[in-house]
Image (cartoon, helix red, strand yellow):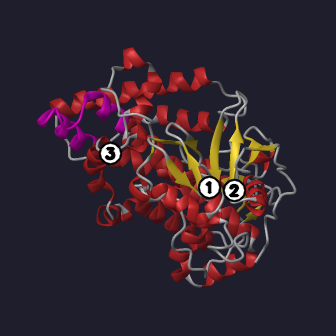
């Protein structure tokens, strides 16, 4: 097993508050360059820190698994500081208002209502029905990769597999026809270089195009009902207007499409990369396919797609990691840091596919636990398992140091160049 991350020498606390809680700068470049090492350094010095923003405001940042898990369960820590206002239209709020009307960033009771509407589509039973389609799609993508790399030419597993498979599946789940998926491919390409040169304006333009596609599909389902997820949402909206507003319908479809594939992208890419960097662990999986489910859980623990969650806001005074905070105080929770806490997972910086990784927080925890987790797990197990079977000579084309999308929030490889021979 390969030890991959050591506690960083930095960050050094820049100050401390009256209670002695140390402070670090949220824009510290170390947080982007080495998220795990950065948080290991924090954890080694203190269980909780203040992260100071450029404007001088501060977010509370717990560093240990148990404190982060408990914070996910604290009903006082909300997605929004105050009771939610009535939804506004796209024209009133702009395109980014779309992000504020779906369950991921909602609080009860609205969150409960929206999540209940979607939960039936993401059960283990419903997910299992997609298995034949997942297997078929994986084989098609691997066939294409085989053709590209037949002469020893490096191929990009992110472009050819990790981004493609989840996008196909989530579009089919919602009911987006193949001829209308180009805009979602544009979004995925934009996401890969969003913080490395792409602009907010470019991302916003693609978001408007996605919304236009969703609105068209909604109107089509009002004329001709369907039994896909979007069709079910339209029926729920039109049968009982109090159950789902038009903005909630559009926003929820939007986030299901985006969050539904971006989580799986990182899981597949990080899982393959972890095995390529740890040949002993790869051999275990190759020699015993029954290890794949446990291996996927370990990939999720070891290197989750989402390193940081949305900032939570205290809706009332509460205590986080032993620190009393006031109403309105932001709290930043790190899933990646929780999963590398040695108090919870011994030797956390080592990949161990035989480990019991139960309890990892890669999909969040509590009421905001990712609904698409069963689908993401199945996609990763099938994709990685078949990849190893078909290409036993699979190896890095340009060394093990894979570039990541430069973001402190996510853990998604920018590319994963490999040779298949």
Q: Farthest residue toward the top?
A: 91
Residue 339 percent coordinates (x, y) = 62, 65
Q: Farthest residue toward the left?
A: 239
Q: Which residue is rendered at x = 43% and y = 48% of the image?
A: 76
Question: Mark 2 and mark 3: span between their CA atoms?
Answer: 50 Å
Circle 1 residue? 145
Answer few, some or many: residues within 10 Å of disc 2's Cα (few below 14, many 20 plus, some between 14 and 19). Answer: some
Q: Farthest residue toward the front?
A: 18
| Residue 233 drawn in magenta | yes
The quadrant the N terminus occupies is bottom right
In the image, taking residue 212 as reference, residue 359 lies left or right, namely right
Question: Mark 1 and mark 2: span between their CA atoms?
Answer: 6 Å
Residue 292 percent coordinates (x, y) = 54, 75
Q: Main secondary structure of the magenta part?
A: helix
Answer few, some or many: residues within 10 Å of disc 3's Cα (few below 14, many 20 plus, some between 14 and 19). Answer: some
Q: Nearer the viewer, mark 2 or mark 3?
A: 3
Q: Which residues are magenta?
A: 230-252
The one of 274 and 331 positioned closer to us in this rendering: 331
Going from the N terminus, do you reach mark 1 or mark 3 first? 3
Asked which quadrant contains residue 384, the reply is: bottom right
Asked which quadrant contains residue 315, the reply is: top left
Answer few, some or many: residues within 10 Å of disc 1's Cα (few below 14, many 20 plus, some between 14 and 19). Answer: some
Q: Which residue is rendered at x = 26% and y = 56% of the image?
A: 120
Going from the N terminus, do you reach mark 2 or mark 3 first? 3
Circle 2 residue? 149
Q: Which residue is rendered at x = 21% and y = 34% of the image?
A: 221
Residue 335 percent coordinates (x, y) = 59, 57
The image's mark for residue 108 is 3
Contact between labelled residues 2 and 1, with CB atoms less than 8 Å apart: yes
Q: Secondary structure at mark 1?
A: helix
Is residue 405 visible from the viewing direction of this image?
Answer: no
């Amino acid at each position: 097993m390969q030890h991959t991350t050591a506690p960083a020498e930095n960050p050094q606390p820049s100050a401390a508050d009256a209670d002695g809680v140390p402070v670090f700068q949220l824009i510290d470049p170390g947080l982007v360059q080495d998220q795990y090492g950065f948080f290991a350094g924090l954890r080694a010095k203190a269980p909780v820190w203040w992260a100071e923003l450029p404007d001088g405001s501060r977010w509370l940042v717990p560093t240990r698994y148990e404190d982060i898990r408990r914070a996910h369960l604290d009903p006082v820590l909300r997605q929004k500081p105050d009771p939610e206002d009535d939804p506004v239209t796209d024209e009133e709020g702009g395109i980014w208002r779309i992000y504020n009307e779906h369950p991921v960033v909602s609080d009860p009771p609205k969150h409960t209502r929206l999540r209940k509407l979607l939960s039936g589509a993401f059960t283990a039973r419903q997910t299992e029905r997609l298995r034949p389609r997942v297997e078929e799609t994986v084989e098609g993508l691997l066939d294409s990769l085989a053709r590209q790399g037949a002469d020893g030419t490096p191929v990009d597993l992110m472009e050819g597999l990790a981004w493609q498979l989840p996008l196909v599946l989530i579009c089919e789940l919602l009911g987006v026809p193949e001829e209308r998926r180009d805009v979602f491919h544009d979004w995925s390409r934009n996401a890969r270089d969003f913080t490395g040169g792409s602009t907010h304006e470019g991302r916003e333009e693609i978001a408007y195009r996605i919304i236009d596609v969703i609105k068209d599909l909604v109107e089509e389902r009002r004329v001709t009902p369907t039994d896909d997820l979007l069709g079910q949402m339209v029926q729920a909206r039109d049968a009982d207007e109090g159950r789902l507003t038009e903005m909630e319908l559009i926003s929820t479809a939007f986030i299901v499409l985006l969050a539904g594939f971006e989580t799986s992208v990182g899981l597949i890419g990080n899982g393959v990369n972890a095995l390529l960097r740890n040949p002993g662990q790869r051999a275990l999986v190759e020699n015993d396919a029954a290890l794949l489910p446990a291996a996927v859980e370990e990939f999720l623990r070891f290197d989750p797609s989402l390193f940081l969650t949305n900032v939570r806001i205290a809706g009332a005074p509460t205590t986080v990691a032993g620190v009393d905070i006031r109403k309105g105080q932001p709290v930043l929770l790190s899933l990646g840091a929780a999963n590398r806490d040695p108090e919870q997972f011994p030797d956390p910086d080592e990949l161990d596919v035989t480990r019991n990784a139960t309890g990892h927080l890669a999909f969040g925890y509590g009421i905001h636990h990712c609904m698409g987790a069963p689908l993401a797990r199945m996609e990763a197990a099938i994709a990685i398992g078949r990849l190893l079977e078909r290409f036993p000579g699979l190896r890095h084309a340009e060394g093990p140091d894979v570039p990541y999308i430069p973001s402190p929030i996510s853990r998604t490889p920018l590319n994963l160049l490999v040779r298949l021979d």
